[in-house]
Image (spheres, rainbow, N blue to C red):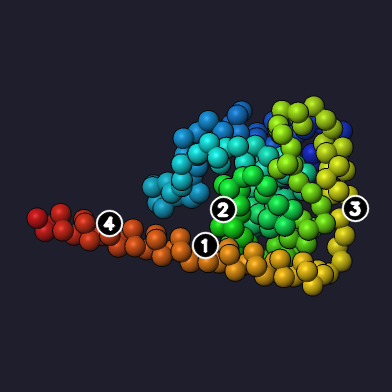
């Protein structure tokens, strides 16, 4: 799977996004019109969640953030961009706040150093969630967008004390979400199992 860092800075954001959709097999519309978002498959059964209007509104910016940051679309890359977005702020998008907190622990368990560096980078740059419209961003050059967000000047210095406090708070929230979701999933599976057993006996 290609990464967003392969895209030339002189490309328009629109051109880079189209290539990003193609490289990641998202479809021509990026999957924005899909009814469901599939996370993974349990055998032949796809597991995911409804592609709500709130999620679509946030992911239109999120996709451009992949182009700006260069983070990949695998599990670790999504955790990195989740950390970066949480640090730089998800503004008026509750779906982004929620989904980023859900993604964060997956990356922390896989490569905590990369996720921590992504969070620090987010503390020192800005994102596109404050922009009024995605359409107004598509004609500019990719390199110009990266420059405007401060991506080229982001420091790799260790986290400050304030940044470490913000990161620890994000982790507490994220792992709390994760624990709650796992408990709900286990409860659902147990309930379905009991229902099947009861119907089978009947």
Question: Dot 4 lies on which element?
Answer: helix
Q: Mark 1 = which residue? A: 177
Per the model, the C-alpha gap separating discs 4 and 1 is 22 Å
Residue at 59% in and 58% down: 101
Q: Does residue 105 appear anywhere in the picture? A: yes
How crowded pointer 2 is (Cα within 10 Å; few <14, some 14-19, many 20+) is rated as some
Q: Does residue 81 appear anywhere in the picture? A: no
Percent of width and height locating residue 174: 58, 63
Q: Nearer the observer, disc 4 or disc 1?
A: 1
Tell which of 88 and 194 is nearer to you.
88
Per the model, the C-alpha gap separating discs 2 and 1 is 8 Å
Of callouts 3 and 4, which one flags the residue occurring earlier in the amino acid sequence? 3
Mark 1 and mark 3 residues within 8 Å of each other at the beta carbon: no
Residue at 81% in and 52% down: 125
Residue at 16% in and 58% down: 198
Q: Mark 3 = which residue? A: 153
Q: Nearer the observer, disc 2 or disc 4?
A: 2
Of callouts 2 and 4, which one flags the residue occurring earlier in the amino acid sequence? 2
Mark 2 and mark 1 residues within 8 Å of each other at the beta carbon: yes
Percent of width and height locating residue 172: 60, 69
Q: Mark 2 = which residue? A: 98
Q: Which mark is residue 11?
A: none
Q: Mark 4 = which residue? A: 192
């Amino acid at each position: 799977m290609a990464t967003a860092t392969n895209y030339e800075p002189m490309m328009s954001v629109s051109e880079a996004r189209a290539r990003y959709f193609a490289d990641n097999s998202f479809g021509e519309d990026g999957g924005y019109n899909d009814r469901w978002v599939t996370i993974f498959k349990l055998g032949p059964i796809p597991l995911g969640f409804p592609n709500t209007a709130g999620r679509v509104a946030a992911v239109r910016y999120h996709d451009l953030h992949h182009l700006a940051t260069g983070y990949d679309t695998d599990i670790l890359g999504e955790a990195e961009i989740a950390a970066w977005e949480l640090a730089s702020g998800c503004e008026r998008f509750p779906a982004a706040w929620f989904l980023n907190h859900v993604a964060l622990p997956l990356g922390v368990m896989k490569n905590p150093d990369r996720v921590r560096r992504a969070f620090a980078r987010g503390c020192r740059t800005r994102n596109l969630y404050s922009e009024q419209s995605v359409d107004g961003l598509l004609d500019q050059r990719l390199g110009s967008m990266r420059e405007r967000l401060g991506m080229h000047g982001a420091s790799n210095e260790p986290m400050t004390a304030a940044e470490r406090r913000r990161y620890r708070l994000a982790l507490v929230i994220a792992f709390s979400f994760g624990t709650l979701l796992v408990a709900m999933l286990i409860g659902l599976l147990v309930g379905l199992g009991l229902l099947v057993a009861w119907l089978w006996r009947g």
